[in-house]
Amino acid sequence: MENVGNIKEIVIKDKSGNDFKMIEVDGVYLTSVGEELVGNKPEVHFRKIKDLKIRDDDVMICAYPKAGTHWIWEVIQMLRTQSTEYNKQIKEKQMLRFGQMGGIDQEPSPRVLNSHLWPRHLPAEMFSKKTKIIYLFRNPKDTIVSYFFHVSGVQPILKYYGNIRDFVDMSLYKTLPYGTWYDHVLEWEKFFETTENPFYQFSYEDMQENPVEHVKGLAKFLDLPASDELCKAIVEACSFKKLKRANEEIKDDFLKDDWKEGTSVYRKGKVGDWKNWLTVAESESFDKVTEEKLKNSKVKVRYT
């Protein structure tokens, strides 16, 4: 069995004094979720993640929360089936943090595993078998605004009651589940500098601007056939509005009751929505922190 480092419960207070309960796993703060969701206590769950048996045809999507994982998961499912039919599952069925490991182990191949975790938390066999990794990132301003509304939508589960001002402050100067955006992006950048795993890395903004190009790129990366007609059809089928409707009408969303009425995992899916929510001072703070944190990084942040 793979060893998992010390796991402990943590309470972080925002600037207004609101509690945000998390767990610390191998030095990283993660969401604190009930044992009933993942089926085991945290120390057992994370050991099972490390010990998960990896198959030769597995692919792994990794991203910070709210970077577009649902979008890319559906694109890959369609590329693999060579159709625009929606998978009736939601991606959380194959998500390492929230899926039950026994269930993921029994999922039929080919699996599209996905995670917001750091490299240190992932299955050991991913690295020995050189599993293909897709890494998606989104500009920090849009990411944090979307993340706040996600956390607010599942307030009955996470029980965080701060407002967006409090949340933005935490994202810049304290931490959030999965670490700050900067911690996550820089850790993955460091990983990709030395890994032997094949990887495809791109941004949410690039995908929005050139979706057909990236669907073709993903198909090539995964050694899948993809005609121009299929790629265009997949882009259309995976538009934000159609994915949201599919989630409401077609998919077996076993998490829908966790959301407050009128909310879901799909909110807007736009680039630049941060302008409607961040103050000028907050936007300038993001710019300052981004410049400082990424001064030695090759990561290029786009806001359009």
Image (cartoon, grey):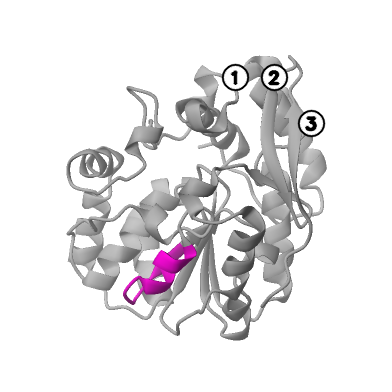
Quarter of the image for residue 3 reads bottom right
Q: Secondary structure at mark 1?
A: loop
Tag 3: Cα neighbours inside 10 Å, few (<14), some, or many (≥20)?
A: few
Which portion, as a residue range, is magenta? 101-113
Residue type, label 2: Asn
Task: Mark 3 or mark 2: name the one nearer the start of the chain.
Answer: 2
12 sits to left or right of 266? right
Who's the residue at 56% across and 77% down the image?
Answer: 198
Q: CA distance from mark 3 to mark 1?
A: 18 Å
What mark, if any, has residue 173 been given in the picture? 3
Q: CA distance from mark 2 to mark 1?
A: 6 Å
Position in image of residue 96 (x %, y %)? 51, 60
Residue type at mark 3 is Tyr
**Residue 290 x/y as whole percent:** 74, 39
What's the amino acid at mark 1?
A: Tyr
Which of the pair 182/261 is nearer the observer? 261
Residue behind mark 2: 18
**Marks 2 and 1 in Cβ contact (< 8 Å):** yes
Determine whether 8 is above or below 230 in the image.
above
Q: In this figure, which residue is indicated by the disc labeled 1?
A: 161
How many numbered tags mark residues here? 3
Residue at the image point whose x is 28% and y is 68% from the top: 79
Mark 3 / mark 1, whichever is N-terminal: 1
* Residue at (53% x, 78% y) in the render: 131
- The numbered disc on residue 178 is none
Could you say which is closer to the camera, residue 21 or residue 41?
Answer: 41
Do callouts 3 and 1 mark residues in contact (Cβ within 8 Å)?
no
